[in-house]
Amino acid sequence: MLPFVLRRIASGIVMLFVISFVAYTLLYLSGGDIARRILGQNASQDVVAQKAAELGLDRPLLTQYFDWLTSALTGDFGRSWFTGQLVSASLSSRLAVTLSLVIGTTIVAAIVSVVLGVLAARRGGWIDAVVQFVAVIGFAIPGFLIALVLVLVFAINLGWFKATGYTPFATSPSGWVASVTLPIIALAIGAIASVAQQVRGSVLDALSRDYVRTLRSRGLSTNRVVYKHVLRNAGGPALAVLAVQFVGLLSGAVIVEQIFALPGMGQLSVQATSSGDIPVVMGVVIIFAIIVIVVNLLIDLAQAALNPKVRLS
């Protein structure tokens, strides 16, 4: 187990370097005249050149990248070129918002998917048909459209939730719940569609195995067989799909945060990308990359814990 974890950590570090270099190169090539954007169109060419030199934009790409990398390795992602705020401060204040959405959505999707998938596999009939219908709807309707409908119905017409804004949990737990409920629902529907289908298929496959018939012949109840043995064996594929959905939720949060005006990483990345604020964009890229690497490692370990037959290699 330990050698596997160490190898994954080492490969994750290498991947971070590759991702950071590719992202920095793409931003460098597509950045345009950033100094002109900062100073405005009326600034003289001498002032623009001076600003470019101040930011280090007049140096070769590799020199800029290695300077950024040297600082980033110490936890210093620099300052925003447009606001002057420390990138690390901007990320820390917004990361909690995005993680609360993504983690909350993942928990909701996992619970609802297991319930729906098991019911569809065990009961069949109209329950299975309803689950299949919900899955198709979840696949077909984009998340941003669901978010707009939720705002219109539950925030504007019924007034049950706030249409926009975010309340930190430390300030008001009830206000926090009210501010993240609709965004989580908007993100969760698509994830539930994918994971519930996988749970249904895995449970159906497991129920047809010989060990299930053996357990039933020993007098074990159906609930015990399903929830203690079948789900344990069917959980691996479902976890893999859930991990993919988690990564997708990070990108989905970008749009949802815009719709609900949530001050998260998605909103920050959109603003920074549109303005060409390379230090902020790089900070967002690295944080997202670390989250994805850690989640994939945790999923591998969880699969090994659920199924001892899995060999980590």
Image (tube, rainbow, N blue to C red):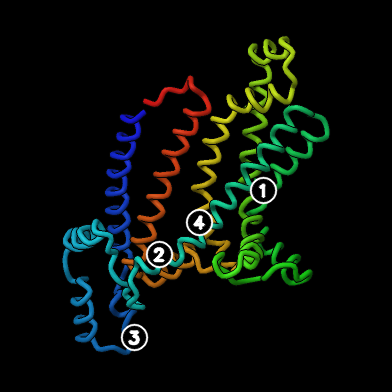
State how far apart marks 1 and 4 are (Cα).
Answer: 25 Å
Q: Name the kind of residue labelled 4 in the image.
A: Leu
State how far apart marks 3 and 2 are (Cα).
Answer: 29 Å
Callout 4: helix, strand or loop? helix
Q: Earlier in the sequence, mark 1 or mark 2?
A: 2
Instruction: State whether residue 164 is above or below residue 233.
Output: below
Instruction: Please name the residue that numbered disc 1 is placed on.
Output: 140
Q: Name the kind of residue labelled 1 in the image.
A: Ala
Instruction: Please name the residue that numbered disc 2 is placed on.
Output: 91
* For residue 25, side relative to residue 1 (left or right): left
State how far apart marks 1 and 2 are (Cα).
Answer: 33 Å
Q: Name the kind of residue labelled 3 in the image.
A: Gln
**Can you say which quadrant of the picture contains the C terminus?**
top left
Instruction: Residue 218: give x, y in percent of width and height.
Output: 71, 10
Q: Earlier in the sequence, mark 2 or mark 4?
A: 2
**Can you say which quadrant of the picture contains the N terminus?**
top left
Instruction: State whether residue 19 is above or below residue 9.
Output: below
- Tell me what residue is drawn at x 64 percent, y 33 percent: 199
Occupied quadrant, residue 146: bottom right
Q: Earlier in the sequence, mark 3 or mark 2?
A: 3
Instruction: Residue 149: give x, y in percent of width and height.
Output: 71, 62
Dot label at residue 41: 3
Dot label at residue 99: 4
Q: Give neighbour class at mark 4: few <14, some 14-19, many 20+ (Cα, 10 Å).
A: some
Foreground: disc 1 or disc 4 = 4
Occupied quadrant, residue 172: bottom right
State how far apart marks 2 and 4 are (Cα).
Answer: 12 Å
Q: Name the kind of residue labelled 2 in the image.
A: Leu
Q: Give neighbour class at mark 2: few <14, some 14-19, many 20+ (Cα, 10 Å).
A: some
Discs 1, 4 touching: Cβ within 8 Å: no
Quick one: which residue is furthest to the right in this view? 126
